[in-house]
Amino acid sequence: MKILTVALQKDGKLVSASFELIEAAKSLGGELFSVVMAENASSLAGELSSRGGGKVLAVSHPQLKYFNDEIYVKALAKIIEKYTPDVVMGPASFYGKALFARLAALLKSPMASDVTAINLDGDDVVVTRPNYGGSVLSRLKSNKQDRPFLMTVRMKIYPESKEGNGEIVEETLDDSVYESKMIIKEMKTESAGSLNLTEADIIVSAGRGMKGAEHLPLVKDLADALGAAFGASRAIVDAGWISYSHQVGQTGKTVNPKLYIAVGISGAIQHLVGMRTSKTIVAINKDKDAPIFNIANYGIIADAFDIVPALTKKFKAELQG
């Protein structure tokens, strides 16, 4: 079996999910390939190679500096045509989902999105993915004749591959691959804080229970004390308290941190969809009947305006001590 992982980069740096994909691919055994596309992919390919990426295919071109799914999908299709992998894996990120949906349509290949487990049943690949907000887990099987089988893998499910040996192959594609109706001149990123929500190990999120945008610094201070990313519910994004880049949930970001602290979030299904697979969930809410407590590992029934400053003070003291 041949497995191809698609490493994505942002601002010339590999996203951490690229190394998680390598670890996910290793679980299937077989021959491992990785591909990275960038303006200059050589250094990125070297990083993948040193962390177990197998045969690393480096595709370099000025048109690959920024993510353009029209160009990226044509380049990937050429790589897949040449190396004929049985399985192609990408991250279940915003860019990964957009790219793989187009790729599946172009190749007329089966695809599973947001995969949380990958196994083998003989020669068949079996994946698990959540449905209906995570209340149902589906197991999907790809037969050998349905190749390549495409999948996006939920981030933070697999650990990052730390080491290994690999081989780098510089790939040159036909110029027609880089033709696009869309021209991207620059990319500006709206900051969601110093940490990326989808890559963070700890997230502290605020909800409508904070009563107003002027009170959000209380929660941000707790996030800073923990070295955490700062998230938000859809309710306070819609209310204009904070930008969309912080939103966790079905129409925001799906996260999977080691620790998720929900402050003043009642637990609407839209929010739970985006964070319920977090390893440990702590809910702070003065409403003992709030739905968030149904999935929380630990619940603090208290007024956030009392408990959050106390927690922040305690964590700061512990870290300084």
Image (cartoon, rainbow, N blue to C red):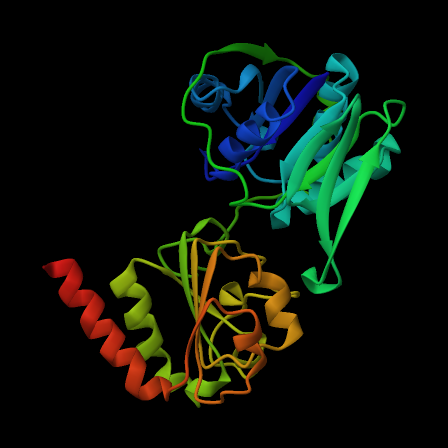
Q: Give the left or right position of residue 284, taking residue 253 as reference.
A: left
Q: In this view, does 146 lie above or below 253?
A: above
User: Percent from the top left, x then y, of residue 262?
Assistant: 45, 72
Q: How many labels does the image show?
A: 0
Q: Give the left or right position of residue 203, taking residue 173 as reference.
A: left
User: Percent from the top left, x then y, of residue 10?
Assistant: 49, 40
User: Percent from the top left, x then y, of residue 301?
Assistant: 41, 84
Q: Give the left or right position of residue 21, taking residue 251 as reference.
A: left
> Toward the viewer: 158 or 228?
158
What residue is rendered at 51% in x and 57% in y?
278
User: Percent from the top left, x then y, of residue 196?
Assistant: 44, 53
Q: Is residue 224 visible?
A: yes
What residue is rendered at 71% in x and 63% in y?
135
Q: Is residue 312 above or below residue 157?
A: below
Q: Give the left or right position of residue 82, taking residue 94 as reference.
A: right
What residue is rendered at 57% in x and 39% in y?
66
> Toward the viewer: 239 or 117?
117
Q: Can residue 69 be seen in this view?
A: no
Examine the image and state in which quarter residue 120 appears.
top right
What residue is rendered at 53% in x and 33% in y?
18
Q: In this view, does 200 lie above or below 292?
A: above
Residue at the extreme left of the image, as rendered:
321
Quarter of the picture containing the C terminus is bottom left
Quarter of the picture containing the N terminus is top right
> Toward the viewer: 131 or 66?
131
